[in-house]
Image (tube, helix red, strand yellow):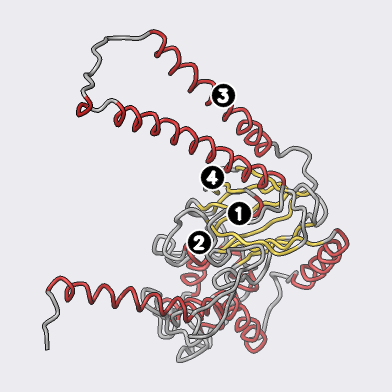
Amino acid sequence: MKMIPNKLASLLPALGVWAGAWLSTAAHAVNDLPGGPAVRQLNLPPAVTKIAAEQQSLHWFMLIVCTVIFLAVFSVMFYSIWKHRKSKGYKAANFHESVTVEVIWTIVPFVIVILMALPATKVVVAMKDTTNADLTIKATGMQWKWGYDYIKGEGEGIGFVSTLDSSQRAMSNSGGPKAGEVVDDYLLKVDNALVVPVNKKIRIITTADDVIHAFMVPAFGIKQDAIPGFVRDTWFRAEKVGSYYGQCAELCGKEHAYMPIHVKVVSAEDYSKWVEGEKKKMAAKLDDPTKVWTLDDILKRGEKVYAANCAACHQANGKGAGPIKPLDGSATVLDADKNKQIHVLLNGQNNGAMPAWKQLSDTDIASVISYTKNNWSNKTGQLVQPADVLAQRGK
């Protein structure tokens, strides 16, 4: 039996890794996601706003111009080298300057740049014109979720937090979709989508609570940084009903990949119905912070809050995972001083590894703390009331 050549033998491990990666990709087959990424997508996604369409036209225009210049310049250069090569008896010319050549290579690029800049400037100016918006929404980047507040227009006063769907987070923690399982919206599904009406000018104001994030939806042609302490804005007018996806486009920490954006564009009638339904939900959730809860009632509320917001990281059994600290048996959770845990939820800790959850209501924070203090092996019997949380806000 012949021995495998050394060079080929050294390549086998790399080939094995490549083949494994290819087979893994093939096993997790996905389809094109309407409004999101497509399989083997090579170009920009289909545009659903005029700005996005103009950006794509500019993309092709610039590409064609640059390609023509490249071919022209290098064709002349290679032709000159080949035609006037030394082997054919040509001798290099000896001159110091040519006013004609210098004028040409100054004026021609200047004209080309102007011709490219004019349409680009028009689009950039249009992108920055956020006036006369029908609806204004503030998008707040948080580690690692988005907060949406409708601050002007129909739906004013509505606010909610949008996070990665807990089932997809659990799927990611277990290594991704199983072999043969098709999940077209993997790591793009959220619990609360941003809902807007079709053919209306939507102004998005961006900011952040902790680090720099970026609000990006490719189908709309928008990408705007969300910077702590600053307010910036962008806009879009979606011309087609449907679901459109994006992600945080600024590296914002260890869970950057778990910060998707889902914008649901609906008809004007459906949007009005959605607004009415959201306002009813908000009215139902208005809790009196002075209400005194029994332990049984607040634990039922806390279980739901934990499942929706905490279980993705700390797991349903409270054991944590990797760098995520467990809550079962945690010294902070078991501590008789309930204010310690209240401060953790209101302000976060470990440089954002545990994000702040001050956007939750006093009742939700009180209920989830009470739940963790009395679940798993934690049997403290301690009860945290909404008034306790309210007293600690701002401290």
Q: At which x and y percent is residue 378? A: 46, 88
Q: Secondary structure at mark 4?
A: loop
Whether pointer 4 and pointer 2 mark residues with C-beta atoms closer than 8 Å, the reply is no
Q: Residue at x 62, y 43 (%)?
A: 55
Q: Earlier in the sequence, mark 3 or mark 4?
A: 3
In percent of width and height, residue 108 lies at: 49, 20
- Gap between marks 3 and 2 measured at Cα: 42 Å
Q: Which mark is residue 292?
A: none
Q: Mark 2 — residue?
A: 143
* Mark linked to residue 218: 1
Circle nearer the N terminus (1, 2): 2
CA separation in Å, label 3 and label 1:
27 Å
Mark 3 vs 4: CB contact within 8 A: no
Q: Residues within 10 Å of mark 1 (few under 14, many from 20)?
A: many
Which residue is the site of mark 3? 114
Which quadrant, please, contains the N terminus?
Answer: bottom left
- Observer-nearest residue: 270 or 24? 24
Which structural element holds mark 1? helix
Task: Please name the residue shown 56% across and 54% down the image.
Answer: 43
* Mark 1 → mark 2, Cα distance in angstroms: 22 Å
Residue at 71% over, 53% down: 48
Say what amino acid the circle numbered 2 marks. Answer: Gln
Residue identified by numbered label 4: 229
Q: Position of residue 82 (x, y in %)?
A: 30, 31
